[in-house]
Amino acid sequence: MSGMKTLSYRAALREALIEELERDPRVFVMGQDAGPFGGVFGVTKGLTEMFGADRVFDTPISEALIVGGGVGAALAGARPVVELQYADFALIAMDEIVNKAAKWRYMHGGGQSVPLVIRAPEGVVGGLGPEHSQSLAQYFWSSFGLKVAMPATPADAKGMLKSAIRDDDPVLFLENKSLYNRRGPVPEGEHLVPLGVASTWRRGGDVTVVAWSRMATVAAQAAETLAGAGIECEIIDPRGISPFDLDTILESVDRTGRLAVVHEGPVTGGLAGELIAQVVERRFAALKAAPVRIAGADTYVPQNQDLEGLLTPDIEAVSAAITALAQAGR
Amino acid sequence: MSGMKTLSYRAALREALIEELERDPRVFVMGQDAGPFGGVFGVTKGLTEMFGADRVFDTPISEALIVGGGVGAALAGARPVVELQYADFALIAMDEIVNKAAKWRYMHGGGQSVPLVIRAPEGVVGGLGPEHSQSLAQYFWSSFGLKVAMPATPADAKGMLKSAIRDDDPVLFLENKSLYNRRGPVPEGEHLVPLGVASTWRRGGDVTVVAWSRMATVAAQAAETLAGAGIECEIIDPRGISPFDLDTILESVDRTGRLAVVHEGPVTGGLAGELIAQVVERRFAALKAAPVRIAGADTYVPQNQDLEGLLTPDIEAVSAAITALAQAGR
Amino acid sequence: MPPMTDEQLLHVYRIMERAILLEQAVLRLIEDGSARLLLHSGRGQEAIGTGVCAALRDDDMLFYSHRGLTQLLAKGMAPGPLLGDFLGRTSGATRGLGAGIVHAVDHSLGLMGSSGTLGGGFVLSAGAALGARRLGDDRVSVHIFGEGSANRGTFHEAANAAALWKLPMVWLCENNGLSVSVAHRDATSIEDVADRAGAYGMPSRIVDGQDVEAVYDAVAEAVARARAGDGPTLIEAKTLRFRGHYEGDPQTYRSKEDIAAAQQRDPVRIVAEKLAARGIAGDRLGAIRNEEAAAMEAAITQALAAPKPGPERIHEGLLAPRETAA
Amino acid sequence: MPPMTDEQLLHVYRIMERAILLEQAVLRLIEDGSARLLLHSGRGQEAIGTGVCAALRDDDMLFYSHRGLTQLLAKGMAPGPLLGDFLGRTSGATRGLGAGIVHAVDHSLGLMGSSGTLGGGFVLSAGAALGARRLGDDRVSVHIFGEGSANRGTFHEAANAAALWKLPMVWLCENNGLSVSVAHRDATSIEDVADRAGAYGMPSRIVDGQDVEAVYDAVAEAVARARAGDGPTLIEAKTLRFRGHYEGDPQTYRSKEDIAAAQQRDPVRIVAEKLAARGIAGDRLGAIRNEEAAAMEAAITQALAAPKPGPERIHEGLLAPRETAA
Ligand SMILES: Cc1ncc(C[n+]2csc(CCOP(=O)(O)OP(=O)(O)O)c2C)c(N)n1
Ligand SMILES: Cc1ncc(C[n+]2csc(CCOP(=O)(O)OP(=O)(O)O)c2C)c(N)n1
Ligand SMILES: [Mg+2]
Ligand SMILES: [Mg+2]
């Protein structure tokens, strides 16, 4: 690996697709507007021109076909990368994701691989309303044969997408719409990030902060402020939920005794509940205060962008909650 | 209310349907084999004969139509009770449940009711395999406009189904396949059980045991044994997840300081995680030991019934886990 | 069916002007920063919403599309609540949840709402028809949708059930040849969506979607059939999308010439010509346009003056209001 | 297409006898308590699985149905692993997960698996055809399903895409007139499922599903078309379900007379008659039957002797085996 370059999250994803399309002729990409138009978020821009319409192409508005067809193509030995235009539409292809992609190997005895990647842009931004703004990873905690990846940086976006495409198991790859324009360093040359290994963004001994996707950045920014106030946060981005790197989190909680969990999407039924239960089960004695959930409001996302802004916690809200946690139970 | 009669869970549900079909001409029932055949679990037996084929009828194998059509009929002012042959098929109609039934009121400003009941038999029994044995309530914690009911007794089955049909909001009504033949007392005459009010099956000061649906019975049986060993369990059946009667649970935890949560379906991503997070958030100081999850194995349900039996905890497993909890942290 | 009366056609003209004025107003409000939203322009497709609604009773039920501004206005919605939504004001149809795609419901107008996940409307509209039948009334359920959306599986499930049960339902496919960037021929295996109806034993018709009378005729006939208990109909209106999929769409997938050619067949001009041919003086149209423009300005001023919702709004309306204890 | 050879027809006869013997064996094992499972008998529909598979290459891909025992055997699966599944033994195709509906996969036989949620096979089979094309090979993807399942929305999404993309795919609908208790006419708005194909510009054919040669002819033609790059075909085989939907089904929805009438058109008898008409001596068939019966007994004995899986089995096979570190 030589040096670093700066790429947007979008460009990093695109580079991953290009490299894997070049490397492996079994790989193909399909989705609504994913062909010549380049995807409504621009991730596949130019790819049809580069690889031809039989490698990168549009689909009808048929989400069950997009995912289920991807499963079928994977069963036949191809390595499809399919795109849902919005992660919300995973709910249309839920049977295909949960009952087909995730279970096919197990229920057919264990020998049959499903090397499928389902890319799906999630998150609250731009006034898209209740059916185009959901964060849905929590639906897949118990889809055991499925991997769920959620990159938070351009480097992870590239490295994790490449790993996902090479993985023999199906991967739900949740991109965050707010991050597409975010720029950051990406290693030159071949860059792979293994799925299911947490990334510790910052070390700190006072509070363990677990934050996914866009909220990892928000948490990291809060941590800067809090450091000024004498609170040292350890920021851990689990990079997804499956495989789940609980060990890194437990090791941190052992040192801090305090856990805050930050994510988009509602508090109730969100990602944090399961994680907190897992930590409390194993580290009850080590905890100095109740773990805290810092997440979306328990409601749906309105189109009104003023109101939309109220849905997810901002740096101030995250800082305030962590401050309270740092002081709790002393 | 005069006396009590003994009914099976199946008969209690059927009685509820009959009474509500009689009471309200807007009510109708549809589902696969729900017409003359009476449903694959026999709940609608004889109803087409009693009420005619325009009130109780079969549908094609079209789960999106069953649920989405139910939503549409409800919007038009009818009060449909639709049946999914297995709760697993909720995943086929996930967009209709999560994005239509649950959100329609909110996203259209708040004034539009969706008085729909979706009956769906869930649970692990009979060798039906990974796609016909799921317990899925946990998928709906954040479907805020949707109510989720899970009756555990014949009396609740009847009283809650009647309440669900009269409710102006959509209700996902999860019946447990293992309970259909279970018999129990049901009050004579009109019997309504409000949705979202927990039922305390047994009082006890040592451990709060929250258990849903079939597992409430298993927990209650374990509690009998444990009482002999000097451990007094308080058994609480939340009767569903939405509305969720957290207060009853918190009040109990305040007294016991110990919480065990019991359900079918996998531990990871299951119902318990969210509940434990809610309790820990509010009662960290009151807890004497880490809350415990007693739930299904983290895998899929095989058809092999010997193996299937390993999936969900039995009385011994529940007793052992509660005993350990009762002794923990002393 | 009797042809449209002069009064009907004048009303159509009025609604079309209203829709165009409203869209223009919204574009202006976006530009000046008063409104932040994603608009899916219906420019070019005005003959459909107006033609459909001219054939409906107030209580007939409409599930409109994401490109549905004309549809809402034609069914009787006033611009005020729509502007309120666009501007995120409590005066909006959704009381401030706001909208690029308005999700208005009004039972007195038969406005049933719109599904943001495309294809949701197929099963909902079939269900509403079933509901009306259960209630013993003779309302007809109508759904307007794009040709791209017709490839959702819900089309199949609902079409089969509607034909099987002879539901009082009319489906109107706005075939503008595009779903976002994807050409109809690249997404759909046959040319005419109407030809899908035969697979269900459902009658169908293809009409010129730029011609309001053609749309009206087909819908009026289908509504009569539905109301008589003879079941559903699929109507395909061939139409043209004048603007991008959403405002801001670079439209890299079609040429300037294609766009210009499409814009030649303007449904408003076609109605104006029809009225002229019927001998209705041009100044009557001018008067209508002026009335509408004035009303629109007033509605905008009013909407801008309406309060914005407080933060509590996001938690309102999730559930039915609690019944007061007996 | 050339007609089936004597050898092919004898093989079909053999597979049919094998399927019947296997079903009978399973019923016996259920009765004596050795097997606990829900069986969906394919009795009466044996001409379909055998006719389809006679027209396929080993590497052609089959997504079989829940009534798919004959289909599995015809594609080359041995009874042993199936019995292992029925009995929940590690010798089973799923290594002890067991089965009432066997979910076997064998790539060397082109056995791709089966979706327990009906209709899943439509999108999977279309996808497999797409995958084969991507890999540049000329495998054909085949899906066998019931007429009731054809009302799932996945039918529509997959049919459209398959026709649009001219995928190498053949769909075979086993129309036995029933989905569990529901008669075809009470669930489907048209009589012939084949007529749904036209909506996609897909060719279709209706065949007598009791006549293996008719099934073979249609499938062979469709496979040739698919392999030549000319796209998918929908074949509807009119057939008869001799037994209940599952073993134990009270069948309150059809009369004893109806059942008896259905059983008149036994595909096995029809094949035997065909062979007789070709001058093949009855004792050759008797010999096949005896061979198969003996082999089945041996397979049962072997399966019963195979070990049951330990409790760890339920956790195996969720994910791909971990790659060993480089
Ligand atoms: C199920 C679903 N898939 C995709 C989208 C994203 N989307 C919104 S509009 C649109 C194009 C729709 O095309 P068409 O149905 O032809 O209607 P038009 O926009 O042309 O009026 C798409 C793909 C969606 N909202 N829902
Ligand atoms: C999506 C889905 N809905 C319902 C069922 C339950 N189910 C299993 S078999 C069956 C009947 C299928 O009828 P058909 O497709 O005609 O096949 P047949 O059983 O007649 O061979 C039903 C409803 C299911 N497995 N999957
Ligand atoms: Mg279109
Ligand atoms: Mg059938």
Image: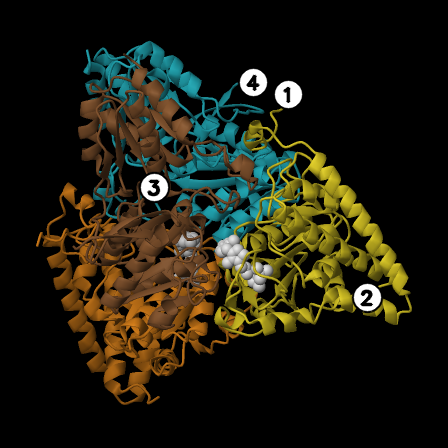
Chain colours: A cyan, B brown, C orange, D yellow
Which residue is disc 4 drawn over?
A2
Q: List x then y, in percent, for residue C137.
A: 27, 76
Which residue is disc 3 drawn over?
B213
**Which is nearer the eye, D97 or D25?**
D25
Within-10-Å neighbours for mark 2: few <14, some 14–19, many 20+? some
Sequence order check, earlier mark of 1 and 2? 2
Q: Same chain, marks 3 and 4?
A: no
Q: Secondary structure at mark 3?
A: loop
Q: Same chain, marks 1 and 4?
A: no
**Which is nearer the eye, A307 or B241?**
B241
Q: Is mark 3 within 8 Å of ligand 2?
A: no
Query: What quarter of the picture does the N terminus of chain D occupy?
Result: bottom right
Task: Please identify the quarter of the rendering in which residue D53 is found.
Answer: bottom right
Q: Is residue A227 above or below residue A261?
A: above
Nearest to the eye among marks 3 and 4: give it. 3
Residue A142 in view here: yes
Q: List x then y, in percent, for residue D145.
A: 60, 59
Q: Is residue B199 left or right of residue D284?
A: left
Q: Name the residue type under label 3.
A: Ser
Distance from Cα at disc 1 to Cα at disc 3? 43 Å
Q: Name which residue lies at 54% across and 23% down.
A: A188
Q: Same chain, marks 1 and 3?
A: no
Displayed-image quarter of ligand 4: bottom right
Which residue is disc 2 drawn over?
D272
Q: Name the residue type under label 4.
A: Ser
Q: List x then y, in percent, for residue B133.
A: 47, 44
Q: Is residue A98 above or below residue D240?
A: above
Q: Is residue B181 left or right of residue C282?
A: right
**Which is nearer the eye, A309 or B159?**
B159
